[in-house]
Image: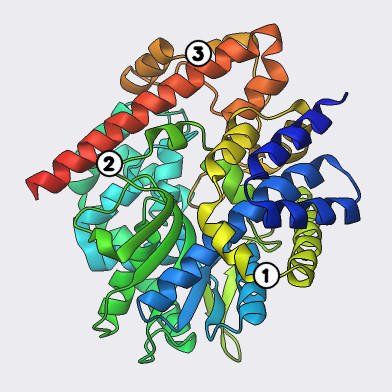
Amino acid sequence: MKRECCKRIEYRRYLNRTSGLLRVSEEAYQKSSGTDADVAGMYVLWPVLFAFLCHVLERARATGCFRLYFLARDGWLMKKMAEKICGIEKIQMECRYLYASRYAWRIPEHHLIGQKCLERICRGGMDVSFARLMERAGLTEEEGHRIAALIHLPQSYISPLSWKEIQELRQPLSECREFMELVSRRSREQYEAAVSYLEQEALLEPVPFAVVDSGWIGTMQESLQNLLDSMGWKGKVQGFYFGLYNLPEGAEEKNYDAFYFAPPSGARKKAHFSNCLFECIFSAPHGMTQGYTCRQNMEPVLGKPEQINVNKTKVQERLLEIWLDVLEKNWHPNLWKEARTLDIRPLLESFMSRPSKEEVRWYGGYLFSDELTGEGRQPLALPLTKMELLKQQLPFRLWFMLGPGRHGIKESGWLEGSIRLYGGSLHTLYRAGAVFYKYLLYLRMQHRFRAGRKAA
């Protein structure tokens, strides 16, 4: 029996207690073409997304929201499903798609928050160099090299930096007058276009609204709040998220609704979850929003998407349409109740943390970048050698994070996928070590979050 068939049996077992959703998934799978993407899509992704969006719609109505803004690009498929549910259930909710990105909102926000912008610029990531930090600040390569000379950068302009080295750059950058002036100038240049787009999309109208996104650390909502505040808006932005690892400093938890996991808890869920994989799957067929420009109306400036990602997104859209058609055909009020009781943890753990080779070959083929600018794309399940996989274990990780430089460590967007394809007979051992590291990391994050909240 093929492993893909074994995975289908496993997913069906997890869905067995929600018989209505299992019936929808079974019928939708029979109507699909039976590719490697179909099993995970029909039995995991769409039931999980359905549970999330039922939660969002329920919470939005309870808090008096009449409009939901689904943030690009993760909100593309979310909006399609939300509209279908609203249509079936006759829910009076306006669903809109907002072209946005961390880059498109952070650059115009920088001059509003002053030195705090360095918290955004000097963050860790998969492959962070000083060049990447300058891109996050909105500087050109020539300007970046000039700043490197002014602060006497001890490393190469393009060499990978450890988390410790990134943090050590914050003070010299904050004290570099030319750098801060360039950041502020670039920010002001982008500001008017950004706020004009937000005004055009009716965010200043007296209609209670909320944003919907995948989540992770909540800085998109913080940036939106700062931009709207600067426009004279007096409200508080409400956000609904699939999961949140952390919140911006000073953020009120009541304004950040997390579905699957939240900052103070859920370490096991986080350890077996891949946010990079989630972003790739629930993405749009268009490129990243790089800014805004005025033609007849304010329009987003979009980067060029990778064709392989566009092709995979179109497959995902087709599978979603099949699942939604079957959902509508088989609709019953019990499905709404099942959305509340669906245990999504074993589904996501099996798919994301214990994938089959067939699943990794399909989903790991997305090109991914965790950079603000979208640069440096690489396969989501990056090919890694046995030595590179060994370096992902806890002792080496701690050394690479705190020591001088990365020493050749290669980061994979979906490490469990890389381990499954390239770990050979030791893949179970490699995976256990990787999950253990993530579990300890998230326990530490949770402890620091709770301690910070108590101190406040």
Q: Is residue 192 above or below residue 81?
A: below
Whether residue 162 is visible to the viewer of this picture, yes or no, is no
User: Closer to the camera: disc 2 or disc 3?
Assistant: 3
Q: Amino acid at mark 3?
A: Lys
Residue type for callout 2: Leu
Residue drawn at (65%, 61%), measured in percent from left and top? Answer: 287
Camera sees residue 62: yes
User: In this figure, which residue is indicated by the disc labeled 2?
Assistant: 150
Horizontal and vertical percent position of residue 110: 30, 63
Q: Work out whether 436 lies above or below 166.
A: above
What's under tag 1, amino acid-wise? Answer: His
Specify whether 189 is left or right of 336. left
SS assignment at label 2 = helix
| Cα distance between the residues tagged 2 and 3 | 35 Å
Q: Earlier in the sequence, mark 2 or mark 3?
A: 2
Q: Which residue appears at 57% of the width and 89% of the height?
A: 297
| Contact, mark 1 vs mark 2 (Cβ under 8 Å) | no
Secondary structure found at label 1: loop
Residue under numbered circle 1: 332
Give the spatial CA distance, label 3 vs label 1: 50 Å
Q: Quadrant of residue 87?
A: bottom right
Nearer to us of marks 1 and 2 is 1
| Residue for badge 3 | 391
Helix or strand or loop: what does disc 3 sit on?
loop
Which residue lies most toward the left here? 455
Q: Position of residue 168 (x, y in %)?
A: 24, 32
- Left/right of residue 342 with respect to residue 191 in the rendered view: right
Q: Which quadrant would the N terminus be assigned to in this image?
A: top right
Q: Residues within 10 Å of mark 2 (few under 14, many from 20)?
A: some
Q: Which of the numbered marks, if any, corresponds to residue 375?
A: none
